[in-house]
Amino acid sequence: MSRKGLIYGAGAYLMWGFFPLYFKALQSVPALEIMVNRVVWSFLFLALVLLVLQEWPTWRRAIRQPRVFKIYVPAAFLLAANWLIYIYGINSGQVVETSLGYFINPLLSVALGVVFLGEALRPGQWAAIGLAGSAVLYLTLQYGSLPWIALALAFTFGIYGLLKKLAPLGALHGLSLETAILFLPGLAYLLYGASQGSNAFVSGSWTIMILLALSGVITAIPLLLFASAAHSIPLYMIGILQYIAPTCQLLLGVLVFQEPFTPARRVGFILIWAALALYSLEGYLYRRQNALSVAAS
């Protein structure tokens, strides 16, 4: 296993885990405007990266493949929806619930693989998914409503991940295309806001302006780190590292932003963590058994 890949992977998930601090600093800006700025500045930054790496001609050829837009147009809008819900959740004081969404996501992704890709699950994996479902049901009954932010984040990112599994482009080229698809509508929205005097980038403070402009950089850097890590460390290690981000978000929500972590919510999280532990343990034992079988033969 590559030590550099492990560092890159952990760095990517740590950056994602501390995103709430960044977006909280933009709390005075509407969530939709933050999301649109993130799209526009991400594309501009990624276009610069493509030029510096001399990948622009390769990217232009790659996006001409016949099935590319059939996958990346819905992926782009799912990504935008995920970003919007995430930013809204953070800036409306629901960081803990956003973390729940990303704890649920790995198990939901497995379930989507069964439904849409016909993947078969082992009994231990079914048990983990069932336990996660019971956690969501428990939280719903306790609060009298669905934890919609958590579920919306899990479903938008889960279906986005499903589309990306079918996608022909790599991480850099794929995100560049997704943000390119959203760039012109996003730019039009910002220009209209500026003409009406309601664009925070134009009418806000220098701090707001800089933070909005840098949202593209802070979006792209962890993605590039993750893409590098994915090529040099095993998939199971990525599976372990992915829990860093929601753990950091949960700790920020409870310890920094002083959000309530009621007994009922603790029980729900414990059920989710138990499901993730069961899923991880089952996967480890399955890989170990396979390795022993190969060695014996």
Image (cartoon, rainbow, N blue to C red):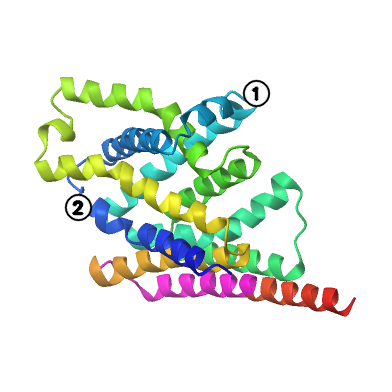
Whether 188 is drawn above or below 131: the answer is: above
Closer to the eye: label 1 or 2:
1
Q: Quadrant of residue 199?
A: top left
Q: Residue at x 46, y 30 (%)?
A: 56
Residue at 46% in and 75% down:
267
State whether residue 48 is above or below residue 267.
above
How would you classify the magenta stretch by its main secondary structure?
Answer: helix
Q: Position of residue 260 (x, y in %)?
A: 30, 69
Q: Nearer the viewer, residue 46 or 259?
A: 46
User: Residue 264, how many percent across, how many down?
Assistant: 42, 72
**Could you tell me which secondary element the residue under label 2 belongs to?**
loop
Query: Residue 30's x, y, as percent?
Result: 24, 40
Q: Magenta includes 270?
A: yes
**Mark 2 neighbour density, 10 Å: few (under 14) some (14–19) many (20 or more):** few
Q: Does dot 1 land on a helix, a strand or a loop?
A: loop
Does the magenta-highlighted stretch encompass residue 159? no
What number is the disc on residue 66? 1
Q: Residue at x 40, y 53 (%)?
A: 222
Quadrant of image for the N terminus: bottom right
Tell me what residue is drawn at x 16 percent, y 43 percent.
208
Decide: marks 1, 2 in contact (CB < 8 A)? no
Residue 165 drawn above or below residue 97: above
**What amino acid does circle 1 point to?**
Pro
Three-letter amino acid code of the residue under disc 2? Ala
Report which residue position mark 2 lands on: 25
Which labelled disc corresponds to residue 259?
Answer: none
Q: Which residues are magenta?
A: 258-280
Q: Earlier in the sequence, mark 1 or mark 2?
A: 2
Provide residue 120's location: percent of width, then percent of height: 78, 57
